[in-house]
Every structure is written in structure tokens, then in C-alpha cells.
Image (tube, rainbow, N blue to C red):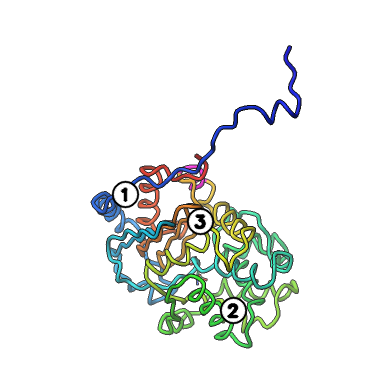
Amino acid sequence: MATFTVKDCRQLPTTNYQLPHLKPLTPAQLETWVMQARRHTQEGKLPNYIPLLAQANPNWLAVQIQTVTEQSYNAGDTHCTFPLMSVVKPFILLFLLQQLGAKVVFSHVGMKPSDLPFNSLTQLIADEGFPRNTMINSGAIALCSILPGINAFSRCENLRLWLNQTAGCQLTLDNQMLDSVRSLPNDRNLAITRLLTKAGNIHSPETTLDAYNHVCCLAGTVADLARIGMLLVQAHDAIAPQNRRIVNATMTTCGLYQASARFASEVGLPTKSGVSGAILSIVPTQGAIACYSPGLDETGNSKAGIFLIQQLAQNLNLSIFG
Ligand SMILES: NC(=O)CC[C@H](N)C(=O)O
């Protein structure tokens, strides 16, 4: 019987594993998929705990695809500006990994997926005040306590300026949206913040929660969203490869809350959603896909956005899992 030695193993023919390359995409094809996705816009629900989000037009749908070869494709209502809401979470993480390092960041928050909703207090109680991951509210609120800055505005401004400078986009703070967020009490986020404080995880709870509300109201178009997505696609002078990998892995396992595992097997792209209907997928080494459509499914993910990314990923063979 033939035996293998380590040397033999090295000499075995190596299969050239390559990530799938973006197949040529024509504007007409993209228009067709956008038209199909439009049929799903009415199936979603608008959130009503932030009054201004409830005023969005449920028919809006926009997509922007940015590739590493500087090509960009877009279709739909690309003029729409929207708040990032939870789509900002991977970028809070990326910024802090760059500024403070993984050791500090992961002393405040974990890396485990959660099967409970994004604003679950039950999960945080079960975890004794140590948030499961950075993609749910408790994790992002905890991280807002270590954002550099003397007050909520400057913590948000430091993140905004860094993103605009590093990604070449033009995010702005949507003050009207911030007023709207503050206009109704968000008991869940308040209780989460209280528990984080009690557990010794955060200091200055008011400033921290206010900083979280600020960063959720950073706003832009799908073009801006695709640009910040590019920070996670390929090597960048300002970003350590290891940090990019951590953020992509976290988006894959936790980015769509309870729907993350299913989406990973069906679509296979690191993805993050927000309650505004924003959704961002990363195609590592190739490009970023940004969508916006405000109607949400029961998990809080954009109904038409998820459908459109699914279409793109399946038709263009984009899954990172081959
Ligand atoms: N899923 C989300 O986008 C949540 C963000 C929102 N600001 C909240 O705290 O509820």
C-alpha cells in the first residue's frame, strides 16, 4: 500500500483555487433583476418606532455595485439618501479595530451569533451584560462607549471623518433623523444600556447611547454605502488585513441577525442590514453591493434588498463558499 510522506503531499498537484470572478454584468441584466425585486417592495413593513423611517416610500429601491476594477453599475432610485442605521455597525468595529486593536475591542463584546432579535434584552441578560457580538444593538452600544471623542457628536464625527477620508465617500449626519430617533423613547436600547453599565462594561451611559443614536443616523446614498463597503473588499493602506477579515467573518455569521446562517448557505456573502432598509454585501477581492429598499421582513432586513442580492449572488456565482 502506498504511503504518504509530508514531502509527497507537497508534490501533489495543487488545484488552483480561485474566488469566482464577477461575470460580465450588463446594465440591462441589472435593470431586469431590479424590476423583479421591485415586486417584493410592497411585501415589507416600515418600522414605526422611528417616525421618519415610517414616512419612507415603500416603493423605493436602489442598487449600486462597485468593483475593484473601478467599474460601477447602478439602477433604481439611486438619488435616495438614507440613514445607515445598523449598517454602520461593521464600520464602528473596523474603525475601533484600527484605532484600539482587537484585544481592547473584544474585551467589551463577543463574537458569537445570536438567535434572538437585534434589540434583544433577554440575550444580554443571559450573557450577563457581555454582548454576544458587534452586529446587534447591545454590542454596538458597548463599542460606542470606546469611540474616541469628548461627547456624542464628536464620537460620531471622528467615525464619519475617518470613513469619508478612508473610503472617499460623503456621509453626513442626518439631524432630522436623529431628532426622530430621539422623539420616541426606545425602552429596549435604554434597558440594554443600563444593563451594560451595571455589568461594568460601559461608562457614561447617556453619552454612549447618544453616540450610538448619532452613528446610526450617518446617512448617504447607495454609492456612499458601496464605497465604505470597498474598505472590506481588498487590501487598503489604512486597514490591516486581519481587521478586514474579522469584520467580514462577523458580518457573515451575525450580520443579518437570526437570518445569518440561512443567508450564508443560500447566498454566501458577508452582509449587513439596517432598519432603514439599507443592506450591504461584500464580495471579497471583487467588489461591494449596496442596496436600499425600506420595506423590512420580520427579522428587520430589507425584503427587496435581500431578494436582489440573492439574485445577483446566484446568477453571478458570487458565494464565497464556491
Ligand atoms: N437594526 C437596526 O438598524 C437598529 C438601529 C436602530 N437605531 C435601533 O437601535 O433600533
Helix, strand or loop for disc 2: helix
Q: Which mark is residue 256?
A: 3
Q: CA distance from mark 1 to mark 2?
A: 42 Å
Tell me the amino acid under the disc marked 2: Leu
Pointer 1: what residue? 25
- Residue at image position (65%, 67%) is 97
Residue stretch rendered in magenta on the structure: 262-266
Q: Earlier in the sequence, mark 3 or mark 1?
A: 1
Mark 3 or 1, closer to the camera: 1
Q: Position of residue 319 (x, y in %)?
A: 47, 44
Secondary structure mainly formed by the magenta segment:
helix
Q: Is residue 225 above or below residue 71?
A: below
- Residue at image position (40%, 47%) is 22
Q: Which mark is residue 184?
A: none
- Residue at image position (39%, 76%) is 51
Tell me the amino acid under the disc marked 3: Leu
Q: Looking at the image, which is closer to me, 10 or 158? A: 10
Q: Position of residue 227 (x, y in %)?
A: 44, 66
- Label 3 CA crowd tier, 10 Å (few <14, some 14–19, many 20+): many
Q: CA distance from mark 3 to mark 1?
A: 26 Å
Q: CA distance from mark 2 to mark 3?
A: 22 Å
Residue 53 is inside the magenta segment? no
Helix, strand or loop for disc 1: loop
Relative side of 39 to 203, left or right: left
Q: Quadrant of residue 192?
A: bottom right
Mark 1 or 2, closer to the camera: 1
Q: Position of residue 112 (x, y in %)?
A: 65, 54
Helix, strand or loop for disc 3: loop
Pointer 2: what residue? 209
